[in-house]
Image (spheres, rainbow, N blue to C red):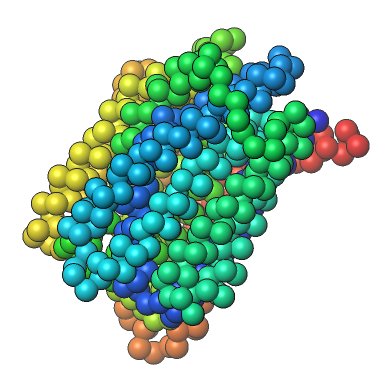
Amino acid sequence: MQKRQILINAVMSVTQIVVISGVLFILYKFLLKAIGVEQLGIWSVVLATTSVAQIANFGLTGSVVKFVAKYIAREEDENVSGVLQTAAISVAGFVGLVLLIGYPILKWVLGLVFPDEFLPLALSILPYALLALWVMVITSIFQAGLDGYQRIDQRSLLLMGGAVLHLLLCFILAPTYGLMGVAYARVIQNFTILLSSWLLLKRQLPLLPFFPYKCDKDIFKEIIGYAINFQVISVTTMFYDPITKALLSKFGGLSMVGYYEMASRMVQQFRALIISANQVLVPAVADLKEKTPEKIQSVYITSYQLLFYLALPLYSLIIVCTPMISELWIGHYEGVFVIFGTLLAIGWFLNTLAAPAYFVYLGTGELRWNVVSHIAIGLFNAGLGFLLGVFYNGIGIVVAWVFSLALGGTIIYLSYHMRHKIPLIELLPKESRTIILSCLIGLLSILTIRHKLNDIFDTIVLNSMIIVSFSIIIFIPLWFHPLRNRLMGWVADELLNRKTAT
């Protein structure tokens, strides 16, 4: 049963990413027409700025997953209820206080970022953005509780349903109320997910009250002691997006922020398909550390090789498809969007290669290099971003962000290889070197086709030629790669086991 639930959770996690990606595609395409790219940029900057207040949750979401699972295993339902209520009340209080205190500060920050003609609109949606954030942070506690019950499938259904609801609300409200309608939609969406998450938790644990009221001091001490270890990483991560978008708004303009938001969302959704699979390393490595620590290195190498095999073609495909995504999503070829999408694909590919080492570090409890990586990303993004923004405007800021991402990933995987004496040449797996060559040839071929034939064929024919050509070039090395057979073997074994069990 547990193995089946893990499979269901994995499938639903991937399904969630696919569905939300589709919803975002439709939503942003609609908002570009309904409110325009500049107002989309305003919404993006305000959300990014207010997200800094999540610093007040002290990493309690991660603690809830751990301690809910712990007390479920011990069959201590009272303590499970205590963890959920204590965490929810604590987060609601801490974050609510920070938002109240920070409201005038955020108004001042927005005054520095936005030109005078856009500032009133930004300030008008700020309270709604803060309310939506407050509700979302509380909801994250309840969703972490579902994770503790290993009902990630239910959480995924909630998030998919919430995304669809937000899309429908934007369809209804944005044409009438403009950007304010988008803010209304976000608040309604978050309240709906909040109530639904709590009701689903109550189905798992009937003794939960209808409204959290119990805050246990001893439980709080226990969960905060665990959570604080991850807070440095959480804090630095929270500043990435606001700083990048604030710099873009200052040196590039709101249109650039809007196109950056769309390009970033696109790449991040593709990236999530790979990262969500690698997250299973954390509990697996933690178990190996206690039982057979000598196997951890083998698990890391296999995971890295598999990730490289999947990530390189995926990010190459993103670069190939970005121009046609621009035409489908925005309605025309938008050079800024294409440049941002290409740069972000490169940066996130180099950063994604660090995922196996990052999650192994989490599993073994060695967080130092993860922390160093995040701090380096934050410092370089702010400092280099400001410097390049002064001289090269918006493009320079995104280049600084891409460099920071690559640097952060390099710190993690170089430190892991050096610490465990794994040859650095393993960062370019021998079996995948043909794929590296084929992806480079494919990208160069696509550039040539687009340059030479752009004025000869219409958009549909040209894009079809590009997709077919790239697929043909990378198909053979992907098909004959040893990991393809191993992947198919894993799937076949799982299906066979399920048939046997039934």
Q: Residue at x 31, y 64 (%)?
A: 122
Quadrant location of the C terminus in the rendered image: top right
Please tell me in which quadrant of the rendered image residue 383 appears.
top left
261 lies above or below 8: below
Left/right placement of residue 215 relative to residue 496 reads: left
Residue 406 seen in the current view = no
Please tell me in which quadrant of the rendered image residue 117 appears.
bottom left
Q: Say which of 357 and 404 sits in front.
A: 404
Q: Say which of 484 and 112 sits in front.
A: 112
Residue 443 coordinates in the image, percent (x, y):
37, 63
Q: Residue at x 64, y 29 (%)?
A: 148
- In this view, which residue lies farthest toward the left? 391
Residue 193 seen in the current view = yes
404 lies above or below 208: below
Q: Say which of 263 and 241 sits in front.
A: 241
Left/right placement of residue 7 relative to residue 216 reads: right
Q: Residue at x 60, y 47 (%)?
A: 194
Residue 391 coordinates in the image, percent (x, y):
8, 60
Residue 354 coordinates in the image, percent (x, y):
39, 35
Q: Say which of 66 and 14 sits in front.
A: 66
Quadrant location of the N terminus in the rendered image: top right
333 lies above or below 403: below
Left/right placement of residue 144 relative to residue 439 reads: right
Q: How many marks?
A: 0
Q: Residue at x 44, y 17 (%)?
A: 225
Please tell me in which quadrant of the rendered image residue 71 appears.
top right
- In this view, which residue lies farthest toward the right? 502
314 lies above or below 211: below
Residue 471 coordinates in the image, percent (x, y):
52, 64
